[in-house]
Image (tube, grey):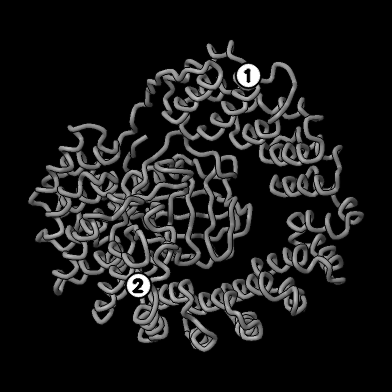
Amino acid sequence: MVATLVLLWAAPLQAQDAASDARAREAALRPPAAEWQAVLAAEDARAPGDRELYVLLRATRSTEAELRRMAVRALGRLERPALLSELAPLLQDADVGVRAQAAQAVAQSVHGEPAGAARVLLADALAAAGESEQAAAALAESLGRLTHRDAAAARSAILLLLPHLDRSAEVRLGVIRGLFFAARQPSARGAFGGPATAALREQALARTGADANGASARALAATTLIAVGGADEDVLGALMQDGAASVRRAAIAGAAALSDTAAAHRLVQTGLEGADPRVRYEALRVYGARLAATAGCDAVVRAAGDADAHVALLGLDLLDGVCASDPRSPGLLRAAAGGRFAARVLPALARADPASAQTRLTAFLDHTDFFSRTHAARAAGLLGDTAALLRLAADRHPNVRSAAVQELSELGGHAFDSVYAAQLADTHSELLMSAAAALEGSTRRGLATTLLRALERVSALRQETSRDARRALLERAQELGIASLDVRVQPYLRDFDPVIAERAADVIEAWRGARPEILPQPLPPSRVPTFEETAALARASVVIEMSTGERIVLRLHAFDAPTNAARFARLARSGYFAGLTFHRVVPNFVVQGGSPEANEYSGDGPFTRDELGRSNGRGTLGLSTRGRDTGDGQFYINLIDNVRLDHDYTVFGEVVEGMGVADRLEEGAVIRRISTDQPAALPR
């Protein structure tokens, strides 16, 4: 699970012009720029010792407010409850930005732990916040997101928040965010009765602003109200009249929980007939999950021909799912298999009309697009076509081979162990993981040695991003190996990755019965950007140019996520992204790309640290990770306000032009290049 770090209060900054914000910060910090970089280096190292911690603590007493804000943010990211005593005075700092940062840092320092003193600190600071809108908003959110041990504790926090809904739009949004995070905790949901539910209903229905922030607040209030069971048909119907698609989409999601099926159907039908494809998509999703089994598949059939590609694909998926028994499904899937979604629907056709799928399969085995060949592997598995799978297991692209291995394992188990073992000669992470999984329980002799040889080959690359593959190889070697092989595992007790060193100790302990000591030898840290480089990045324009010629223009939030903004710009300038794809497309969620292998498990070699600082609003650019501090150069674009990702994922930029292009991206969309007008050299 991805570990959470501190979230900065971002709404005011997101409303500012990036260039003017960068100029203001540059002017404010010009004299102590060296100290700024020292704080960044200590933060990036996660203050492992007293010296680095002293750098951060000293900066909290700087005369420069920007340095104090930066230092308190870094302290919160350490997630050390023992630092509460250092953070407490900063809740009364003379600078409102420092106070807001301190509020978030207090909550983050006890993340996942009993709130204890943090609850008292935040409650007292909120009561004393006065007219300080930015600080009050951050305090309200932070108080709501503390871990509430039970409904009574949550109720006391909620009652402290509600009076602040009468304040400015900024504070109201902070309160709503606090209520949202509280409602995400099962232990707190019982606290949302009476006043809290009424307040959420009022905020969800308050169409007082046409601006994006107003719509975001209404949508989040609606989502929270629905989560705590406070939205009936009348409320959802009123929400469906809102002018903001985000609010209507939230209302449609709420229809799924209505006990009255007829009422749910009425709301969903309204969504299906809407003009916004995001609302239609959500309505179709709810229709398939809740209504199609009893109301029939006419709506699904219509959706399969929708003008929006994402809605149409969901319709086709439902024809393969809940509507598979509808007599129209095979014909519609056959028709789709001859059009733009041909490869995508091939597995569905294999279930609906195996004979038709079999005749079409051959054409995809040598398709120029490896995504299409991967879908062909899935279809071949459903058809039981081992000849096709063996051919695809020798494909030139590792993703195709990985899919073929998974299907062969399902079909023939250990009859194909030699095929799985052959994949271990590669270094691609997902393929190695698939092969290792397929070999579970094998009785083939010598496999442990083969697995350890693969581990040595991958480890020689010294890439932190190989962690998942190396962990899988060690797990399988432990199962299939014997104690005499421990000499092959002992070097990993000093591995550059502490996670692998721990896993190596597990293997030796399982074989020998005694746990050896680990002495990890981390790789040298990457250089952090200078203040001047960061200031230049904050002024830069970045363009994602697609193979279609369409463009997505970005600006980087370099002062909020310096190391990740610098890495992204460096990779762009080096040509790293040219020819890569958006391999993950999840409508009404994110599009993700930047992987050399077009999967979750490959990227630029070293990990970068999480730098949470902004909310995952629609159009923001985030850092894809697979655990704490595991950024590898992959990125995602939020297609909606993904507030639930806040405090977990770094946001380091935003789309300023071309969001419609991002909305239309489909699986496998090719990046021609990413360019930036920022000329300075950047850290490697």
Q: Is residue 518 visible?
A: yes
Question: Which quadrant is the C terminus positioned in?
Answer: top left
The image position of residue 160, as x and y in percent, is 25, 72
Secondary-structure class at tag 1: loop
User: Is label 2 or label 1 in front?
Assistant: 1
Q: CA distance from mark 2 to mark 1?
A: 54 Å
Residue under label 2, please give it: 176
Image: 25 above or below 173: above
Q: Residues within 10 Å of mark 2 (few under 14, many from 20)?
A: many
Q: Nearer the viewer, residue 478 or 392?
A: 478
Point out the tag, 2 or 1, that comes first from the N-terminus. 2
Residue under label 1, please give it: 481
Q: Residue type at mark 2?
A: Ile
Q: Is residue 655 visible?
A: no
Q: Residue type at mark 1?
A: Gly
Q: Residue at x 39, y 86 (%)?
A: 207
Residue 606 circle label: none
Q: Residue at x 77, y 78 (%)?
A: 296
Q: Residue at x 36, y 54 (%)?
A: 556
The image position of residue 248, as x and y in percent, is 52, 79
